[in-house]
Image (spheres, rainbow, N blue to C red):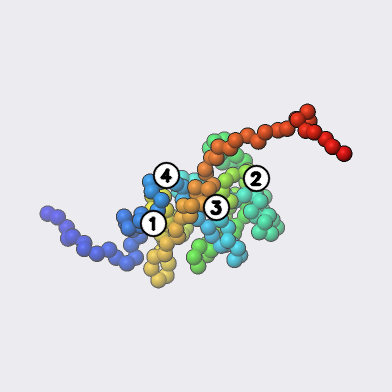
Amino acid sequence: MEGPIRDHVAEDTLAFSEDNLETLAEPHNDTLVISFLLNKIQVKHVLVDPGSSTNVIRLGVVEQLGLLDQIILASRVFHGFNMTDEVTKREITLPIDTFGTVQNTKFQVINDNIRYNALLSRSWIHSMRAVPSTLHQMIKFPIKDGITTIYGEQHVVKEMFTVYQEEPTPVLSTSDVSWSI
């Protein structure tokens, strides 16, 4: 015996559909990159990574935001970060604003030169009760009045991770230069 067939989806259901794919540059294999607000300043190039267990932010971003005084000393080892073991010595808790939902988020502060400004991990995703989809390039999460959606910035991903082949710039030797006085 089969159960009842649903012909509708409850309004508070987090769901993705084929319609969500219509605006994307397809086919794609892009990571999910978003922006968030921090003290009313937009922080771009934020990687959403459900496979990571720790939120990360670059020291340079914290410095640009004028928040160095909020960093606290805390040592932590990341296994497999940037394909090596990474030791961080600093962390910071920041009020991340994603479309009106503010969540205090603890970040490990790293000094590495990485392609993104911050990484939001599984801990942030779970605290927001969010569901990310790299296929659909969006994150959906519940708010007081229903469900909201953060759209990934697919065009930014293309810029961040594209490898360009450039022709080498020729270097002139001093014997190739004619001097006149």
Going from N to C along the chain, the mark reached first, 3 or 1, is 1
- Label 1 SS: loop
- Amino acid type, callout 4: Asn
- Label 2 SS: loop
Q: Which residue is mark 3?
A: 45
Q: Which residue is mark 1?
A: 23
- Label 3 SS: strand
Residue in the image at 49% along x and 65% along y: 99
- Cα separation, mark 4 vs mark 3, equals 17 Å
Going from N to C along the chain, the mark reached first, 1 or 4, is 1
Can residue 180 be seen from the camera position used here? yes
Residue in the image at 56% along x and 48% along y: 116
- Cα separation, mark 1 vs mark 4, equals 15 Å
- Cα separation, mark 3 vs mark 1, equals 20 Å
Instruction: Look at discs 3 and 2 and give the one toward the viewer.
Output: 3
The extreme front residue here reads 180
- Cα separation, mark 3 vs mark 2, equals 16 Å
The picture places residue 102, in percent across and down from the top left corner, at 52, 65
The picture places residue 43, in percent across and down from the top left corner, at 58, 58
- Cα separation, mark 2 vs mark 4, equals 28 Å
- Amino acid type, callout 3: His
Instruction: Look at discs 1 and 4 and give the one toward the viewer.
Output: 1
Going from N to C along the chain, the mark reached first, 2 or 1, is 1
Q: Which residue is mark 4?
A: 29
Asked if 153 appears above or below 110 in the picture, the reply is below
Q: Quadrant of the N terminus?
A: bottom left
- Cα separation, mark 2 vs mark 1, equals 36 Å
